[in-house]
Amino acid sequence: MAGKIFMSLLLAFGIINPSLFIKLTEFWKFDRKAPTDKVLFATRILCGVAILLIWIML
């Protein structure tokens, strides 16, 4: 249960601030250009879908 809550909070952060979420989760990629609006929108959608899957499947 604690894992669900932790992952949900992390993914909710991806919905709220997708650009910082990308920076935190892809820190190992050097010299990365700024994400486009489409990438930020896709990040929000995929984080929302992931939260739903976590709570439905696990």
Image (cartoon, rainbow, N blue to C red):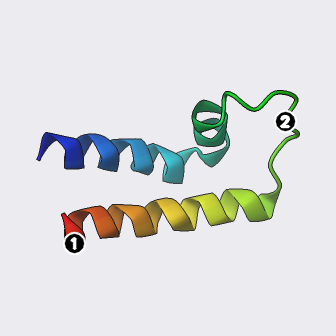
Q: Which mark is residue 32?
A: 2
Q: Is residue 39 above or below residue 6?
A: below
Q: Which residue is mark 1?
A: 56
Q: Amino acid at mark 1?
A: Ile
The residue that appears at 65% across and 36% down in the rendered structure is 26
Question: From mark 2 to mark 1, how far is it between C-alphas?
Answer: 34 Å
Secondary structure, mark 2, is loop
Q: Position of residue 31 (x, y in %)?
A: 88, 29
Crowd class of label 1 (few under 14; some 14 to 19; many from 20; radius 10 Å)? few
Crowd class of label 2 (few under 14; some 14 to 19; many from 20; radius 10 Å)? few
Q: Position of residue 39 (x, y in %)?
A: 74, 59
Q: Is residue 13 left or right of residue 6?
A: right
Secondary structure, mark 1, is helix
The residue that appears at 11% across and 47% down in the rendered structure is 1
Q: Quadrant of the C terminus?
A: bottom left
The residue that appears at 77% across and 65% down in the rendered structure is 38
Q: Position of residue 40 (x, y in %)?
A: 69, 56
